[in-house]
Amino acid sequence: MESISGHDSKQATIDEIKGYDVNELLGWVEKNLPNALTRKQRDKFKDADINGTTFLEHAGDRKFFHEGCKLPIGTSERLAKLAAEIAPIKSKFTIFIHAHYVNCKLTALQKTDNRPEM
């Protein structure tokens, strides 16, 4: 695999990928998923104007690539997984767990603050 900025191309940073235009992103995708896109699929990707930021914002979202970009489901799945390898996926479940944890901490603090002094 060729390197980007002196390291393995899958190790490109989020900031590097966010700066990619559609052509740079396609080049990076093809290095990481050789032969994943046909010429017709490359054209659809370009028509959808998917840049690095958009690609990372839809990490793990195969529906976006399939329905939004009109790519085949298999290709959409591979692109969603590739984006997820780079950008962490913030699921609703993860946000719910964090919110529950914060709520529990606040409740515990409120209980200790409302106790009468001894």
Image: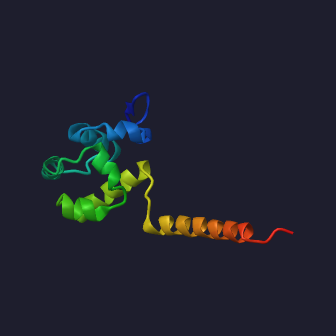
Residue at image coords 33%, 61% = 61
Q: Which residue sits furthest right? A: 118
Q: Nearer the viewer, residue 94 or 11?
A: 94
Q: Position of residue 73 (x, y in %)?
A: 25, 65
Q: Nearer the viewer, residue 90 or 106?
A: 106
Is 57 left, or right, of 102 in this rendering? Answer: left
Which part of the image, by quadrant, shows the C terminus?
bottom right
Q: Is residue 96 visible?
A: yes
Which part of the image, by quadrant, shows the N terminus?
top left
Residue at image coords 17%, 52% = 41
Q: Nearer the viewer, residue 54 or 107?
A: 107
Q: Nearer the viewer, residue 48 or 43?
A: 48
Q: Which residue sits furthest front? A: 117
Q: Quadrant of residue 90?
A: bottom left
Q: Is residue 72 visible?
A: no
Above-or-below relation of 75 to 28: below
Above-or-below relation of 114 to 79: below
Residue at image coords 33%, 57% = 80
